[in-house]
Image (cartoon, rainbow, N blue to C red):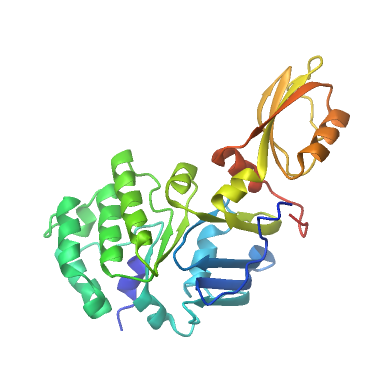
Amino acid sequence: MGVDIKLKPEDPSVSLTPESSEASAIVASGLGCRYGKRWVVRDLDLEVPQGSVTALLGRNGVGKSTTIQMLLGLLRPSQGSVRVLGLEPQSQRHRVFRELAYVSERRELLEDTRVSELAKIVAEIHGERFDRDGFERLRARYELAPQAKCKTLSKGQRARLLLALSLMARPRVLVLDEPTSGLDVLVRDDFLEAIAHFASEEGHAVLLSTHLIDDVSRICDRAIVLRQGAPAITGDLDDLRRSCNRYVVHLDGVVPYESALDLPEGVVVTERDPRAITLVARGQSEHLEHQLDQILPLRDLERHPANMKEAFACLTAPGKPGGAA
């Protein structure tokens, strides 16, 4: 939304390569960003369908914010192509932002502008699409004084103001970069409730970048998982979770903490005791269990479905450069 202001004049159910569709709000193919010789994002394919709440997930430094900036035309890709509602965001940025609202991680505002003045600016940008009465209702609900200057607002108030402005612009696509990071529980609940309501309306799409997996579990139905040195993984949230399992490995004897574990690629250790190790892994369980039996002094093994946090730890594990998922 801060950008709007500046624009005034192994599981078969999990797909690695999205199919292009007329029902897609955002589609990217072969997307990449390079600084010098270092690739921040490379060969990324993704799709955000209309009617979805899609989470963009990944560990810190994997390129989530860079990806969003390329999708919105705020950063020119080093390679690949992007379409937002069928438009090319670099050359048609003003048309894109008439249909889209964006709340950045930095929650930028015009600091010396009053709340009421900022709403007027945004209304001028979006014209009749902007719901002034709806904004006033949200402003009152969020306890935002109309004469307060933006620079005096707390972190939670800034987040609420940006959300109210974004939603009342009535966009077809809402893009949020770490929107609830650092907010208290009540403000986060307001945010998530408003996003869920927006997404429930026909023809809307949400792309949400976050590291807060609890938020993802509450409102998202799909996820795009960015990984360092490996292709992104895309799928329905439940399918992604079910693609991973938690293993509790009980050991025959003691394995000291300092002992290196030569585990298969993609296996993540979540807990470790001298006589037991808890792992999360994706893929065929029988094959992995055989591998673990060869590597560890295994006494017995328990397998359980992974929860979303465990699946996130597993799916975002760095891969080998150029390796397959």
Instruction: Give the residue displayed 77% in from the left and 60% down from the top.
Output: 322
Q: How many marks on residues?
A: 0
Task: Answer with the quarter of the image where residue 162 lies.
Answer: bottom left
Residue drawn at (57%, 37%), measured in percent from left and top?
307
Q: Is residue 232 left or right of residue 208?
A: right
Q: Position of residue 293 (x, y in %)?
A: 85, 29
Percent of width and height locating residue 130: 23, 73
Tell me: residue 263, above or below residue 130. Answer: above
For this rendering, which residue is in front, 258 or 23? 23
Which residue sits furthest right? 294
Q: Residue furthest left?
A: 147
| Quarter occupied by the C terminus | bottom right
Q: In the shown orientation, is residue 154 left or right of residue 74?
A: left
Q: Position of residue 170 (x, y in %)?
A: 30, 70
User: Which of the 4 image quadrants contains residue 285?
Assistant: top right
Please tell me which residue lies in front, 282 or 125.
Answer: 282
Q: Is residue 177 above or below residue 117?
A: above
Quadrant position of residue 231: bottom right
Q: Position of residue 51 (x, y in %)?
A: 44, 65
Which corner quadrant holds the N terminus?
bottom left
Can the viewer see residue 114 in this picture? no
- Residue appearing at x 35%, y 56% in the figure: 195
Name above or below for residue 129 compared with residue 183: below
User: At 30% across and 59% down in the image, what residue appears?
Assistant: 163
